[in-house]
Image (spheres, rainbow, N blue to C red):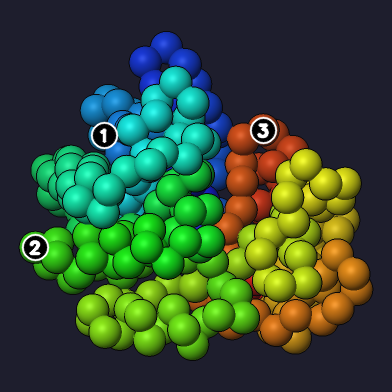
Amino acid sequence: MLINCDLGESYGSWTMGLDAQVMPHIDQANIACGFHAGDPLVMRATLALAAEHGVSIGAHPAYPDLPGFGRRSMALSAGEIIASIHYQVAALEGMALVAGLQLSYVKPHGALYNDMMADAAVRAAILEAVASYHRPLALMLQATPAREQHLAEAGAMAVELLFEAFADRCYDDDGSLLSRRKAGAVHSRERMLEQVQQLRADGCVTTVSGRKLPLQADSLCVHGDNPEGVQAIRDIRALVDGS
């Protein structure tokens, strides 16, 4: 199982995350493209870090919501979603090419990601954006019990999917992430490591009600916004590597 993390989310004089400390311990960097965070200098620095540590790079596009960090849903048409994703992905890919790097996949951010998982029309627009890009890219989305449906949707557009699970989030019984408004939505460090070990050993998570939920995940999403998070990523790396 690979490890991915959202990075490059600083902007101007505002610093978000500990990218230099996180990058040595992950396999995939989801790099902000400027609509929710990130700017040209931050993109360039994040790409350089990824190159230094041999980390695969993905575009992390969002709704055009810089003030809200991309966490607010927007009523965009399919055409607007497609154009905004092309704009963001092309910007990051262009900078990656200058750095001698190759973009591998797309992972939507924040509200766009949540809407993709909950709304078939939004998901179809995002699939169309990836399918109509000038070269093949994979799409990363959440591993849920709807895996076969999502594979069928993507297969109809010849889009490769990468499924991810979340290390630090509690799952609801339907396979969605438990709302952050509910108690226990974010795991303690001990519970997070237990969930990672369960995913690695048994291919499942324990939901909020205690149900065992099978999940087939290619990658594990982690968060490194603070020193404690960075240490947790080191521990997760050791678990995933079996050391």
What residue is rendered at 66% in x and 64% in y?
176
What element does badge 2 sit on? loop
Q: Is residue 134 left or right of residue 119?
A: left
Is 239 or 176 nearer to us in this picture? 176
Few, some or many residues within 10 Å of mark 1 (<14, 14–19, 20+)? some
Task: Compare marks 3 and 1 and give the one earlier in the sequence.
Answer: 1
With respect to residue 6, does 119 lie above or below? below
Q: Which residue bears the numbered disc 1?
A: 44
Q: Nearer the viewer, mark 2 or mark 1?
A: 2
Q: Is residue 52 visible?
A: no
Q: Is residue 156 visible?
A: yes
Residue 215: x percent and y percent?
64, 80
Q: Is residue 195 left or right of residue 177?
A: right
Task: Compare marks 2 and 3 and give the one earlier in the sequence.
Answer: 2
Query: Could you give the CA–CA distance between mark 2 and mark 3, rounded to whole angstroms?
Result: 37 Å
What element does badge 3 sit on? loop
The kind of residue tagged 3 is Asn
Q: Is residue 87 left or right of residue 227?
A: left
Q: Which residue bears the numbered disc 3?
A: 226
What residue is rendered at 90% in x and 73% in y?
210
Q: Which residue bears the numbered disc 2?
A: 134
Residue 39: x percent and y percent?
30, 26
What residue is rendered at 61% in x and 46% in y?
223
Residue 161 is tagged as none
